Image (spheres, grey):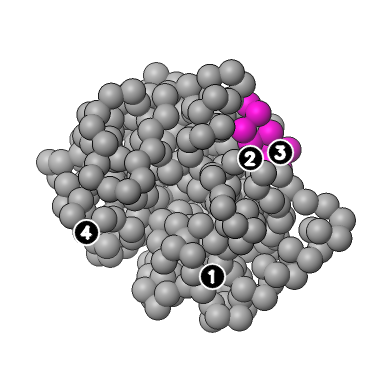
Amino acid sequence: MAAPSTTAAPSDPAAASEPVAAPPTTPTTPAREPVLGNGQTVTIAFGGDTNFDGSNAARVASDPSSILAGVAPVLSGADLAVVNMETAIGVSGTPAPKEFTFQAPPAALEAYRSAGVDVVSAANNHGMDYGVESLRETLQAEIDSGFPIIGIGANETEAYAPLIADIRGQRVAVVAATQVLDGSLSDAWTATPTQPGLASAKRVDRLVRAVSEARAQADTVVVFLHWGVERETCPTGDQQSLAQTLVDAGADIVVGGHAHRLQGGGRLGNAVVHYGLGNFAFGTRTAEAARTGVFVVTITGRRVDGYQWLPGRISDRRPFLLGGGDAHSELAYWDGLRKCTNLTP
């Protein structure tokens, strides 16, 4: 499908603080209803952690569209598709003093665009792996490509600013932030009024403010998070507490990842939450790490009409959807993950 009309975080801090104007009500534009917006139903697809190391590095150079080809029909078929970009974008900078650092050239963004992804989040514990210099390259790649990257910015106003997508008149806001930051790097990586960086979910009050501001602009509010503990299939108490706080602040959908394992999803009051989307285009060493899929939510304004998990498997760092009996058994596994989430089906 054609990409939705979007408004990304602007590069001018003053402009970033200005709300996106709502379209005027006219005889051909029905008045907005507090719950349903203009009444149009929207489908949103979510994918987990992606980077471009190993065999995917060669694919970026030769055929980036092949990386997400196995899930492209679902992503492109949704009205809006959101994925986690767990890498810095650029060709310079100095790797951070940590075990794993990821960086990919700007051409990697074509892997998302060609698969129908509409926006990626760089708010994660690899978004600044190559320092401020590479962060600035990531921001420049966003400008040069016209492909939206959220959760980062030249200051906190930009980093916490949502993407606003206009989908058949429905306004969908997507806010991104990370609860996972290496202790020694947290201060340097966190965006402030005067410092470039990432939107930190550790600053709960600031994230709640971003969600509240998005609520005032949009019919549907999505929060896309990096959170949890690696290799755990149950959400932490911090995850569950933050999810409830964000729903109370006005979020309709709260999704995220980081554990490199699937975690459960379901309803939290009137909202829908998915704690762990798992790996997506990523290196895997175990069968658990290779479990993947696409989470699809159907929503009309604030009313969640339904959701589904489309299970998949990662092979050679690329995700592929499953069918038949394999899909059935993996869906049963995913349903079982809800037991430790305090979510309802």
Q: Name the residue under label 1.
A: 233
Q: Is residue 258 left or right of residue 265?
A: left
Q: Mark 4 points at which residue?
A: 183
Magenta segment includes 167:
no
Q: Quadrant of the N terminus?
A: top right
The residue that mark 2 highlights is: 316
At label 3, counting other C-alpha atoms closer than 10 Å, the crowd grade (few under 14, some 14-19, many 20 or more) is some
Q: Residue at x 56, y 32 (%)?
A: 55
Tell me the distance, in whole angstroms, between the alpha carbons under discs 3 and 1.
24 Å
Counting every numbered tag in the picture gives: 4
The residue at the point 24 percent across, 28 percent down is 93
Give residue 17's quadrant in the image: top left
Q: Tell me which segment is drawn in magenta.
A: 65-79
First of labels 3, 4 by sequence position: 3
Circle 3 residue = 70
Q: Distance between the residues labelled 2 and 3?
A: 12 Å
Amino acid type shown at disc 1: Thr
Q: At which x and y percent is residue 303?
A: 61, 63
Callouts 3 and 1 close, C-beta under 8 Å: no
Residue 226 horizontal side relative to residue 47, left or right:
left
Would you say the residues marked 3 and 4 are in contact, meaning their CB atoms lie under 8 Å apart?
no
Which one is earlier in the sequence, the residue at label 3 or at label 1? Answer: 3
